[in-house]
Amino acid sequence: MNNNRVGCCGGEIVGKRKCIERESMRAGNGDGRDELNLAEFPLCALAHRLPAERKTLRFEDRIWDKSRGVHVTRQLTVTGSDAFGLPTALDDEVLLGLIQLSRQHGFADRKVSFTRYQLIRLLGWRDDTKTYDRLEESLNRWTGVTLYYRNAWWDKRRGCWVDEKFHVIDNVWLCHRHDTRPDVGLGAPQSAFVWNEVLFRSFQGGNLKAIDFEFFKGLQSAIAKRLYRFLDKRFFHRRHWEFDLKELSWNHVGLSRGYDAASLKRKLRVGIVELERAGYLEPMPDPERFRKVCSGTWEVSFTKAESRAVAEVVDRAEPTPSPLVTALMDRGVGVKAAEETVRKYPAEEVRTQVEVLDWLVARKDTKVSRNPPGFLLSAIHGRYATPPGFVGSAEKARRELEHRSRMELTANQQSRREERERMHEQKRQQAVARFLERLPSDERFQLEHQAVMSAPPLQRSLIEQGGSLSEAARRLAIDNHVSRLINDPEYEY
């Protein structure tokens, strides 16, 4: 009797392994897990194929570090192996699938046993030879990838940003004999992989967030999937967020730095529209979604759909702060102090002092180096004058408008001047033509001879030389001669 085959799954006789895999995949894949550091920066390019010579990706942003009371620059560098290169969008899905496998094992061990069939079913991929080959390629690639975090890896146990350098996966074993079959026995050899210690320590430290893995798999575009992972982390705190367009697109979504603002908006719309249609984001018209701050600087806004927000406890707890309160909080000001300041002082003054703070911090000014949030509150409450050399966004917008108006005025004046000159030349040519038409042939021949003889020496030389320029020079000499006669008040014609 075969002990590996029993009645289960509604009485159908199938292998124990098939039952276990189906149940594990059915049991709450919508309630998946994502590691918070991996959700913050992309680990891969958005393309499905990359040039063989490209082996490095780099992402960077700047945030306020409350634990140190300073702004810090976070940087992630991703390098690929010579043999397998950098991870792509499909590899990112595989990595998230590996996290779900670890969740099914309770994140109990760095080594996770699995079958390739199980992982392919978990990912929702087609069960065929090409898929198995693609999965093996992805596992090879992740084994060769190295991550270099600089001030960008959040160590939950220590409560601070740290530097970390590590491979994602240390080892992989693939059992090709059995793991493509759904009905093999429990005792058959399995494939396995081993997480790097740094990443596994983060799992066990609880640096994880819930993710609707089924929703993630249902998204079509790589941009929508990347946006979903990043925004879902941010929406834990509040429903509405505004980001600098370039920083979000380049450093958190992974779009090329070669794209200008118009191209970035066009690329992002693909993912945004998909998330809107899926009911994850509140739909917005473009003027609300993308807001121009000043020349070359745009902001993009996102609001989590009410239907999803209401279903989550964290979003029911308190109302979304206003953008100005959020701006103060992002720069280290406490919630109550930020709310009271925005309530008491004009919005334009608060906004200006926030811009002044950022301007001073960027220049490493000593006035703000020790306590930036304290300086910001003092500047708002004391209504400090803006420092010499500072130009706020409102003034930049005004100057840009004035410059554009001057350019338009100059262009209009030039256009009118050119039109007047064109009309004058047209009338002159018509008068010359009428004059010549009225002359008898012998008089016309004599006039043309006089015109050539009275032409400047260089022009007469061109006429005498013949060739392609001769006729044009002769025509010009005649036109000029006739124009002088027409404008001579003593000449009758």
Image: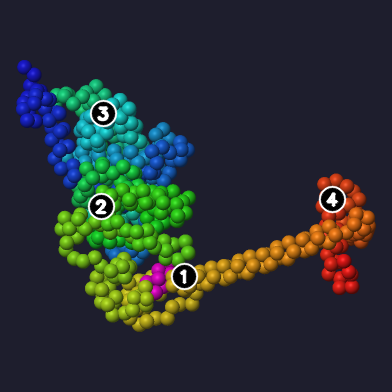
Q: Quadrant of residue 426?
A: bottom right
Q: Amino acid at mark 1?
A: Ala
Earlier in the chain: of badge 1 and badge 2, it is 2
Q: At 88% from the left edge and 47% from the top edge, which residue is drawn?
A: 466
Tell me the CA gap for discs 2 and 3: 30 Å
Residue at x 28%, y 59% (from the top left corner): 303
Which range of residues does the magenta coloring cover? Answer: 352-363
Separation of residues labelled 1 and 4 (CA atoms): 55 Å
Q: Which mark is residue 471?
A: 4
Q: Secondary structure at mark 1?
A: helix
Quarter residue 116 falls in: top left
Residue, disc 3: 127
Single out the mark in the foreground, 2 or 4: 4
Circle 4 crowding by C-alpha within 10 Å: few under 14, some 14–19, many from 20: some
Q: Nearer the viewer, mark 4 or mark 3?
A: 4
Q: In the depicted view, which residue is nearer to us: 17 or 286?
A: 286
Residue type pointed to by label 3:
Asp
Mark pair 2, 4: CA separation? 73 Å
Left or right for 337, reference 486: left
CB atoms at circles 1 and 2 under 8 Å apart?
Answer: no
Labels 4 and 3: the sequence-earlier one: 3
User: Which of the two marks, 1 or 4, is nearer to us in this view?
Assistant: 4
Q: Secondary structure at mark 3?
A: loop
Relative image position of residue 66 (x, y in whole percent): 29, 65
Q: Is residue 35 above or below residue 326?
A: above
Mark 2 sits on what residue?
Answer: 280
Q: Nearer the viewer, mark 2 or mark 3?
A: 2
Foreground: 210 or 461?
Answer: 461
Q: Is residue 353 magenta?
A: yes
Please tell me how crowded label 2 is: few (under 14), some (14-19), or many (20+) other residues with Cα within 10 Å: many
Mark with earlier residue (1, 3): 3
- As drawn, the label of residue 397 is 1
